[in-house]
């Protein structure tokens, strides 16, 4: 048993490894297609996007070996330290970071740039798993719920201040994990209601939404008086008024923030998405071209390197957040479905393996991995096909960038290591 434990490849789930290899390999083919020009001849070259990405892919091999070298106990024991170090890496950006496209999200090391927010997700997942897996942790206690929220939203706040709202939104995925571990569904319902109120306020304005809300409460009051009789007089109306006050402040705050805090390009994206504005040549150009590129692929696609819109660079920065449009044009509906199925298989496999863990730490981390992957895939693809606003979230294992690739590799292979040791006494 000890000999198997010392073998870093013993017990690992090869299905997850195979899915990882297929996704990364197929992702590189699409980056190659999106960034290749007739003058490019070298594969391993920092002068081309696909050359850089191939080097990043090669560097995942020693990274994976290092991750598998440590046993599962290491990740549980040092999860808090890793989390604190990751927070310090975010704080350091405000002193030593490089500003790109208005966000101070990168450390510059000559030819190499690193985005720490891509790595913090894995260490936050470890910290959440460590906190909740404690035997004395009880989710029914409000103070424990607050502890979990602090662990999750501290990095989200630091990332928001960069500002990089898209990367910060990913931390909402942890609510799925918390719900699995006993957090009441009310939080998710409140979150959904907040989104509905936010969109309603943008569409109709604060005054109309507040008026409709007041009308609904009035109707409820009349109905309660009619059905309640004398009990109506004993009803806790201060609670209803308190809820109305809180919701009213939220609506007014949303209206104020939208008009005075949000930048114009953020407002434009929401208004284009909600149909309040049409701007296919300005702020909505990327999304519009992405939709045209995907729809042009049809059922079977145009073929590898034969996508005229892709080869013509009609979608700006197509090799990054809009990489799914390459898949849609050159591989069609079949190829797009294949990619989505691969992600679904990976997430299903992670959840299945997580449920087999007798160690709570491994299970919680597995659900964190699956939730983060799910959030990334849904938001990125929804953004590319025009169902969600552009928020700058990469497609896992596909979008160009060493930080994103290595961040997801760390996130996945830590779970693979935890799963390989699930039958051992940590």
Image: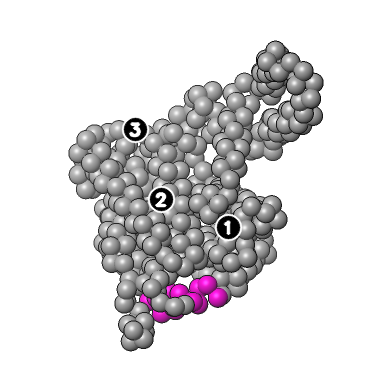
Reading the image, the residue beneath label 2 is 395
Q: Nearer the viewer, mark 1 or mark 2?
A: 2
Q: Are marks 1 and 2 in contact (CB under 8 Å)?
A: no
Asked whether the residues under the numbered discs 3 and 1 touch, taking CB atoms below 8 Å apart as contact, a structural biologist would say no
Q: Residue at x 47, y 68 (%)?
A: 359
Q: Label 1: which residue?
A: 105
Say above or below: 24 vs 196: below
Location of residue 383 (image quadrant): top left
Q: From the image, state whether disc 2 or disc 3 is nearer to you.
A: 2
The residue depicted at 77 percent of the width and 28 percent of the height is 236
Residue 212 occupies quadrant: top right
Q: Which region is colored magenta?
A: 63-77
Q: Which mark is residue 292?
A: 3
Q: Is residue 415 magenta?
A: no
Marks 2 and 3, Cα distance to the nearest angstrom? 19 Å
Q: Is the residue 15 above or below the residue 266 in the image?
A: below
Residue 206 seen by the camera: yes
Residue 218: tell me if it is visible.
no
- Residues at marks 2 and 3 touching, judged by CB atoms closer than 8 Å: no
**x, y percentage for residue 338?**
26, 46
Q: Nearer the viewer, residue 243 or 30?
A: 243
Say whether disc 1 or disc 2 marks the residue closer to the N-terminus: 1
Q: Can you name the residue that lies furthest to the bottom here?
A: 3
Describe the element under mark 3 as helix, strand or loop: helix
How many numbered marks have been drawn onto this rendered protein structure?
A: 3
């Amino acid at each position: 048993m000890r000999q198997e434990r010392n073998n870093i490849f013993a017990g690992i789930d090869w299905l997850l490894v195979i899915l990882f290899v297929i996704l990364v390999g197929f992702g590189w083919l699409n980056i190659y297609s999106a960034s290749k020009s007739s003058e490019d001849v070298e594969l391993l070259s920092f002068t081309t996007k696909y050359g850089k990405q191939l080097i990043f892919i090669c560097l995942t091999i020693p990274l994976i070996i290092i991750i598998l070298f440590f046993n599962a106990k290491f990740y549980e024991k040092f999860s808090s330290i890793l989390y604190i170090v990751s927070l310090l890496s975010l704080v350091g950006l405000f002193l030593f970071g490089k500003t790109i496209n208005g966000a101070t999200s990168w450390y510059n090391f000559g030819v190499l740039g690193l985005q720490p927010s891509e790595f913090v997700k894995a260490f936050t997942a470890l910290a959440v798993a460590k906190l909740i897996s404690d035997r004395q942790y009880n989710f029914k206690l409000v103070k424990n719920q607050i502890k979990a929220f602090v662990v999750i939203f501290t990095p989200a706040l630091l990332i928001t201040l960069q500002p990089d709202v898209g990367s910060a939104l990913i931390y909402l995925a942890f609510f799925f994990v918390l719900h699995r571990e006993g957090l009441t569904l009310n939080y998710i319902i409140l979150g959904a209601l907040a989104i509905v109120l936010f969109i309603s306020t943008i569409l109709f304005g604060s005054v109309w939404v507040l008026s409709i809300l007041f009308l609904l409460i009035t109707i409820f009051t009349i109905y309660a008086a009619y059905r309640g009789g004398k009990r109506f007089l004993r009803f806790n109306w201060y609670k209803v008024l308190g809820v109305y006050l809180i919701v009213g402040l939220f609506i007014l705050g949303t209206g104020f923030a939208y008009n005075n805090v949000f930048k114009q390009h953020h407002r434009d994206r929401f208004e284009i998405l909600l149909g309040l504005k049409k701007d296919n040549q300005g702020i909505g150009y990327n999304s519009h071209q992405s939709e045209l590129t995907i729809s042009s692929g049809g059922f079977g696609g145009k073929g590898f390197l034969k996508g005229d819109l892709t080869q013509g660079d009609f979608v700006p920065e197509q090799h990054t957040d809009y990489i799914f449009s390459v898949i849609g044009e050159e591989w069609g509906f079949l190829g797009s479905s294949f990619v989505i199925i691969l992600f679904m298989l990976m997430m299903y496999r992670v959840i299945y393996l997580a449920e087999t863990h007798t160690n709570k730490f491994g299970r919680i981390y597995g659900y964190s991995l699956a939730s983060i992957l799910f959030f990334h895939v849904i938001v990125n693809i929804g953004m590319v096909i025009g169902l969600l606003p552009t928020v700058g979230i990469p497609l896992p294992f596909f979008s160009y960038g060493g930080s994103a690739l290595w961040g997801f590799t760390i996130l996945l292979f830590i779970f693979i290591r935890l799963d390989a040791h699930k039958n051992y006494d940590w």
